Image (cartoon, rainbow, N blue to C red):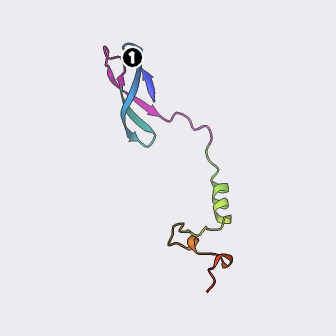
Amino acid sequence: MALKCPECGTTAHARTSAYEAPSVKRSWYQCQNLECSCTFTALESVDTIIMKPRRNEQESDKAQMPEKQQKTLNRYGSASKLSSRQQIPV
C-alpha cells in the first residue's frame, strides 16, 4: 500500500506493519523522495462492515458435501497403479 508523504506529497511506501488490535494495523512509511526521506506511521482500521458472511448456509454446505479422501499423486502412491487394461501380461 502507498500513501502520499505529509511533507512533500511524493508517494511513500510501507516498510513494515504490526497489528495493534484485531482490526487495527499500524504501518511505517518512508517517502520515496530522497531529498525528503520523511518517515511516518499510519493507522489502518475497519470502519464499517458492509456485508457479513451467511454462516447458516456455509455450515449446511459443509455438512452436505462428502469428505474427499486424500490421494497421493507420486510414483509410490495409489494414483501410480496401473489400471486392469494397462497390466503387463505374465
Location of the C terminus (image quadrant): bottom right
- Residue 20's x, y, as percent? 37, 39
In the depicted view, which residue is nearer to us: 87 or 19? Answer: 87
- Residue visible at 67% across and 61% down? 60
Q: Position of residue 73 (x, y in %)?
A: 54, 66
How many numbered markers are drawn? 1
The crowding category of the residue bearing disc 1, from other C-alpha atoms within 10 Å (few below 14, some 14 to 19, many at least 20), is few
Secondary structure of residue under mark 1: loop
User: Residue 35: within the magenta?
Assistant: yes
Which residue is at the front of the view, 73 or 28?
73
Q: Position of residue 74 (x, y in %)?
A: 51, 67
Rendered location of residue 36, percent (x, y): 32, 15
- Horizontal relation, residue 76 to residue 28: left or right: right
Residue visible at 51% across and 69% down?
75
Q: Nearer the viewer, residue 50 or 2?
A: 2
**Figure check: 47 above or below 4:** below
Residue that extends furthest to the front in the rendered view of this protein: 90
Left or right of residue 34, residue 58 in this image? right
Judged left or right of residue 78, residue 34 is left
Q: Quadrant of residue 26?
A: top left
- Is 3 situated above or below 51? above
Q: Amino acid at mark 1?
A: Pro
Quadrant location of the N terminus?
top left
- Identify the residue at horizontal 62%, vertical 53% (top origin): 55
Give, as a single range, the part of the protein colored magenta: 30-51
Find the residue positioned furthest to the bottom. 90
Q: Residue at x 39, y 30 (%)?
A: 14
Q: Which residue is mark 1?
A: 6
